[in-house]
Image (tube, helix red, strand yellow):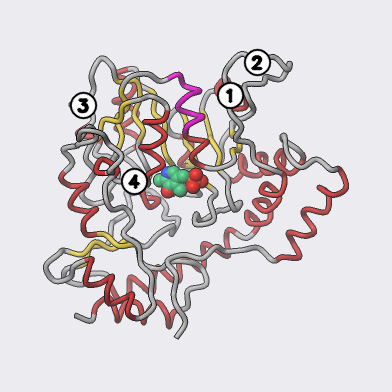
Amino acid sequence: MENIYVTKPFMPPLEEYIEEIKEIWENKQLTNGGQKHQKLEQELKRYLGVENITLFSNGHTALEGTLRAFNLTGEVITTPFTFASTTSAIVRCGLKPVFCDVESERYTIDADKIEALITPRTSAIVPVHVYGNVCDVEKIEQIAKKHNLKVIYDGAHAFGVKIGEKGIAQYGDATIFSFHATKIFSTGEGGAVVCRDSRYKEILEKQKNFGIGREGTVDLWGGNAKMSEFHAAYGLCALRHMEEAFAERKRVCETYMRYLAGKEGITIPSQREGATCNYAYFPVVFDGVQYTCEDVLTRLRAEGINARRYFYPLTSEFSCWEKREGEANTPVAKYVSERVLCLPFYPELSDADTERICRVVLKK
Ligand SMILES: *Cc1c(COP(=O)(O)O)cnc(C)c1O
């Protein structure tokens, strides 16, 4: 039997991409905000229901560019239950991450525990909509207002999620997205920042282009994090097929739920009330008694099925911290991190394969 990977990109038809890039050959503009880039920004603004969006070369440069654009200093309250990128961006921008624990049902930052971590040095909150589960955006906004803090969401997992009719990127001062090959909307490599205040869009545009402003003057030290025309063209094609991709993901999710929901020893995180699901990942938490992560992983591997310990360890436990500097008191995050597996999840995954994965998971 064929190996099953943890993820596989949903690709638009090749002919469509070839058609899309013909113009690039005609006008010979390969990057620096060409036609494809402008068009993708327009389409994404519409899709996400936002005013200001800036494309980036990837989600990580988008996050670092944003932290710099907002001129943050001192401490930033964030979650250790995330991909390396979130914490790494904070540290690389010279900021100190202060780790807050997560909610036990959705694994997003526990807003009730944020205020106790605020000090005179705190400048921002960087929550993560982990697995596409939305944070408690209302409570976070209240806290940020009260203490005059910026809120920068790592929305790398949350493309397309809405709360009621409101797109997820309408919350906070800024939200970053990743368009990496493993994310549900992809440009191969790519990312974007949505910001509430258009002045930050201007700064972000300089951040990603050596600090060069519209007049050609340089008034900040920028880097290079522009999205090329080829990536933007791919994104335009991929965006046209999002509904098909969502429908397939929904089917796979429902098959998993049929076999795994309500099984003793297995927890599947719940969605926040009123929020839509974007079917980005299928995380399962094993209780460590009936099932352990290690045993399930071993059983799956023996059958050529790849699951992923996403996220383990916590970013606060990375070996790059000197002298236990990263240490955090986040027992819920630690509990989840030690027990969670992301099962294979992508549009092409057949019902038969999904059922087979569930059988292997449940076979003790
Ligand atoms: C993927 C990801 C990123 C980084 O995005 P890239 O496009 O890969 O640079 C940041 N944060 C989270 C939570 C991610 O999953």
User: Over which residues does the magenta segment extend?
Assistant: 64-71
163 relative to 244 in the view: left or right: left
Residue holding disc 2: 218
Query: As shown in the figure, which amino acid type bears the numbered disc 4?
Result: Thr
**Label 2 SS:** loop
- Comes first in the chain, label 3 or label 2: 3
Contact? badges 4 and 2 (CB < 8 Å): no
Percent across and percent down for residue 75 are 30, 23
Numbered disc in front, either 3 or 1: 1
Residue holding disc 3: 117
Confirm whether residue 158 shows in the render.
Answer: no
Q: Residue at x 76, y 42 (%)?
A: 30
- Comes first in the chain, label 4 or label 2: 4
Percent across and percent down for residue 273 are 32, 49
Quote the CA–CA distance across marks 1 and 4.
26 Å
Q: Residue at x 30, y 62 (%)?
A: 341
Near-viewer residue (220 or 148)? 220
Query: As shown in the figure, which amino acid type bears the numbered disc 2?
Result: Val
Quote the CA–CA distance across marks 4 and 2.
35 Å
